[in-house]
Image (cartoon, rainbow, N blue to C red):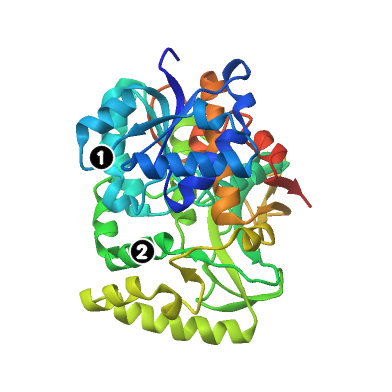
Amino acid sequence: MNRPYHLVIFGASGFTGQFVVEEVARTVSEGPKGNLKWAVAGRSKQKLEKVVEQAAGILSKPELRTEVDIIVADVEEPDSLAAMCKKAVIVLNCVGPYRFYGEPVVKACVENGAHHIDICGEPQFLEGMQLNYSSQAADNGVYIIGSCGFDSIPADMGVLYTRDQFKGTLTAVESFLTVSTGPDGGCIHDGTWQSAIYGLADSQKLQSLRRKFNHKPLPTVGSKLKRRGALFFSNDIQQYTVPFMGSDPSVVKRTQRFLAEEHQAMPVQYGAYAGIGTIGNVIKLLFAGMMFWFLVKFSFGRNLLIKHPELFSFGLFSKAGPTRKQMEASSFQFAFYGEGYTEGEDPCQGKPNAKIRTLVQGPECGYVATPIAMVQAALTVLNESTALPKKGGVYTPAAAFAKTTLISRLNKHGIQFSVI
């Protein structure tokens, strides 16, 4: 805590980074002793100054222009990253795709004693960092906490919340994500699109990476959770539904393994799905999906996908990203359907005899909820260090924050957890 800054936002001038800057500026009073010392970092001093100027205007906080320091740092210059990390208690890393730009920042944090929080939704990067840096991070007392944005705090903390609210032994949970937009619609910045392209192109490498952990299968308690089809109509959310393609299933499974191995908790099976709406949307998705799967296999195809995100995603992704008006009118809802055994019942005998339904809901997921989740995760690390796991390492959100008040903090900031 004797470092100049509690937080340094790396990649502050990127599309998501600019909104993280605004969220940090809103929450300075929640820092240690009511004061948060922070700075912005990135390659271009001019772009960083512009982002701080923009935040000062939008939030009517002219003092930001003089109070927020600027650090020039570049992923291709390790010395600049080391200098940045030595000044920070926590680095908020907003520079993606992480598969290309993430590891040098993690390495610099581990070697220079700064905690690292990212908003990555790329399982290959997240699991690769666990394999390669968890031991060194533990030795240095550094916490590397991945996927602290919309991927995957609502899902990971949502499963944990559902388990904690269940009166008995929770054995399985399915989540259903629905997203609502206003009259102007919505879209996602193409940085996420690029991550998806490279992730699918490299899916074989993820499988070989996972084999290196030599994990034993987690024990299944209660009825085995059946995988649903690639497309089905969900009566629960009254929409056509597909398996969720993001990092949530990977992150939740890693959390359940950690809780089982470190806390002897009963692992919860998990299935993740996303609502896609009407039959018209189904036809669009099938067409776009076939094009994507074909093109992603070839270098020229990947280049086409990267060059024309709006065309190949039917407008879901764009190089410009959503407007602030679109963001204000958008929201998300995760519905969790859990089953298990009531108190006193043996989970190894008979079928589950109790159910629970919980909700996690909040504002626009990519650039409103993600900065809130990321900043509240960082504030939890700063203010509740004794509630974190006993030693450093590479952690999922719910593994790191299981014993903290993160859910309560999120509730106060518009990401609501509730039992129905």
Quarter assignment of residue 333:
bottom right
- Tell me if label 1 and label 2 are in contact, CB under 8 Å: no
Tag 1: amino acid: Pro
- Residue type marked 2: Gln
Residue 141, given in percent of the width and then of the height, sits at 36, 21
Q: Which of pointers 1 and 2 lies earlier in the amino acid sequence?
A: 1
Q: Does any portion of residue 215 appear in the rendered image?
A: no
Q: CA distance from mark 1 to mark 2?
A: 19 Å
| Residue at 76% from the left image edge and 48% from the top image edge | 419
Quadrant of the snapshot with the N terminus:
top left
Q: Would you name the residue on which mark 1 appears?
A: 104
Image position of 13 (left or right of 377): left
Residue drawn at 64 percent across, 25 percent down: 29
Q: Mark 2 highlights which residue?
A: 194
For image coordinates 60% across by 50% down, the residue present is: 368
Q: Specify whether 397 is left or right of 82.
A: right
Can you say whether 355 is above or below 200 in the image? above
